[in-house]
Amino acid sequence: MKTDLEFQTTRNGAAGVADPMEEDDQKPQLQVAAAPPPPPAAEPTELAYIPDCIIEEILTRVPAKTVFRCMAVSHPWLSMLDNRRFFQKHHSLSSARPLVVFSDPLGGKANRILHLYEGRTSSDFEPRTRSLSTRIDFPDIARGRCTFLHDVNTLVTSCKGLVCWATHRGAGDVVISNPITGEYVLANTHARGRNSLREVASVFIGLGYSRRTNSFELLKMTLGLLDPIDFTMGWYPELLALGAKSSWRPAGEASEFDFSRKVCDLVNVDDGTVYWRYKEEPSICSFDFDRTLFRFVDLPEFEGPALKTVSLGVLDSALCVSFVSPDDSHVELWSARTVDNGGAHGVGTAWKKLYHIETVTTMLENSGRVWSRGAYQPVMYVEANKILMHDWRTNFLMYDVVARSESVFPITEDIHVEDGHRAAVQVVSHVPNIICLRETLNIQEGNVRILRTDVR
C-alpha cells in the first residue's frame, strides 16, 4: 500500500525534485481588475422625441450664424443641416438684415470690414445686445490697372446673399463674396471681349441675378466708340456671367449720359434690377438683368426740392426712396414697383407713398428732439410696425410707425480707424445665404480659384 508520501512523490515526480508548476504557483500573480460596469443609459431628452422634420423646420427660421453653431451639436444634426435643400429653404425664408461696411474713405486701400447684424427685434440692435453679429475682415487685395476715372463707385452691392465691390474706384478687379462662409473670388473688369478695340474706359456698377439665364452677372458701363465712321463716343452696358469661362458682352444701349461721375446710392432688389443714383440728379439709373435693359426712372413728386437729402434703400424686397424735407422737418418714404406699360421698353415704374414721418417728436421722453439733417436710408422692417434706417452719421434709427416715436442706436463703437482716418460707413440690405460659393455660382472645378477670409 502506498503511503501518502509515495502518492505525493509519484505525483510530483522523483523524490526531492521540485515541480516547476508548483514554483510558478508560488510566484506573485499580476492582479487584473475587472472592467467597470457600463454606465447606465442616459435618459433621453425631450429634444430626442421631436421628429427631425420639425427640428429642420424650426432651424430654417433662425439666423444663419445660429445654423452654423447647430451643425456642431451632433453628427445627426450635421447631416440634417449640411445639404443644399436645407440651405435653399433657409435662404427663401430669410429676410433682409443690415450689413454695415467699413472701408478706407480715401479709396487708397481695397480692404473691407463687414458686420452683419441678424437681429429680429428692436432691442437686438442696441450696442449691448448685438450678439448675433458676424464680422468679416477682407485684406487689401487691390489689383488691376488704375484709370483716369476717379471717385466713381466705392459702394458695396448685395444680391441673393452675395456681396461685391471693385478694388479700384474707377476700375480694377471685383470681389464677389459670401460674408457668411467667408469665401470670395476675384473677377477682372478689364477682360477683353470682341469689342475690346473700341473700349476707352469702364465703370463697374454692381452684381445682379438673371432669372432668365439662372446666373449671377456683373455689370459695368463702358465708354467706347459707338460709330467707327464718324467716331461717335458713348456709354453702353456690358455683362459678365459668373461661374463659367466667359467674356464681357454688350447688353443693349444706354442714353448719352456721363457715367464717370461718383455713384452716391446703389441698391439691388429681388426682381433682378439694380438701381443707382448720382448726386443732384432728378432720376435714377436702373438695369434689368432679366430684360438686359437700361433705363432711367424718374423720382416721384415729393414735398421739398432738396435732392441732396434723397436716399435709396430696400423694404420688403422692393426699391424704397427716402426724401427729407429741410423746410418743415418731415421724411417721406416711397416704394417703387415695376409694371408693364406697353411702351417702347414694355416696362414702367409705379410709385406709392408709404409714410409721412414728422421729424419733430412730441413724446415727453424725447423732449421734442429734432432729427438730424441729411438723408435717411431705409434698411428693413422690424417687428412689423418699425422701420430701421441709417442716417449716414453712423447711427441706426428705429422708427415706430404706430407710436410715432424713434430710438437711436449709435454704431460708432464698431468703426475702425486706420492711419488717422475715420472709416467710411455704408449700410446694405443683405439677405444671408449659407450655400457655399462654388454651388451658388455654379463654379466648375478648376475654372475659378476660391479664396477664404476670416469670419468671426
Image: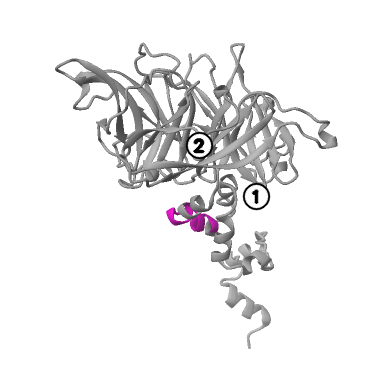
| Magenta residues (range) | 77-87
Placement of 16 over or under 265, stated as above or below: below
Alpha carbon separation for disc pair 2 and 1 = 26 Å
Looking at the image, which residue sits at the far right?
A: 364
Describe residue 237's horizontal placement relative to residue 110 as left or right. left
Q: Dot 2 lies on which element?
A: loop
Q: Is residue 164 visible?
A: no
Give the quadrant of the N terminus: bottom right
- Residue furthest toward the bottom? 1
C-beta proximity under 8 Å, tags 2 and 1: no
Name the residue that disc number 2 marks.
179
Residue at the location (55% across, 55% down)?
60
Reply above or below: 262 against 289. above
The residue positioned 57% from the left and 68% from the top of the image is 51
Question: Can you give x and y, in whole percent of width and height, for residue 75 in the image?
Answer: 53, 56
Q: What secondary structure is the magenta-colored segment mainly?
A: helix
* Quadrant, the C terminus: top right
Q: Determine the residue positioned at 35% across, 47% down.
A: 211
Q: Position of residue 145 (x, y in %)?
A: 34, 15
Q: Amino acid at mark 2?
A: Pro
Q: Is 437 contained in the magenta span?
A: no
Relative height, residue 157 to residue 203 (above, below):
below
Residue 164: percent from left, percent from top: 44, 31
Mark sitting earlier along the chain (2/1):
2
Q: Magenta stretch containing residue 81, yes or no?
A: yes
- Please state which of residues 370 and 265 is positioned toward the viewer in this rendering: 370
Q: Nearer the viewer, residue 297 or 137?
A: 297
Binning the other alpha carbons within 10 Å of mark 2 as few (below 14), some (14 to 19) or many (20 upward) gives many
Note whether residue 230 is visible.
yes
Residue 384 is marked as 1
Circle 1: residue type: Ala
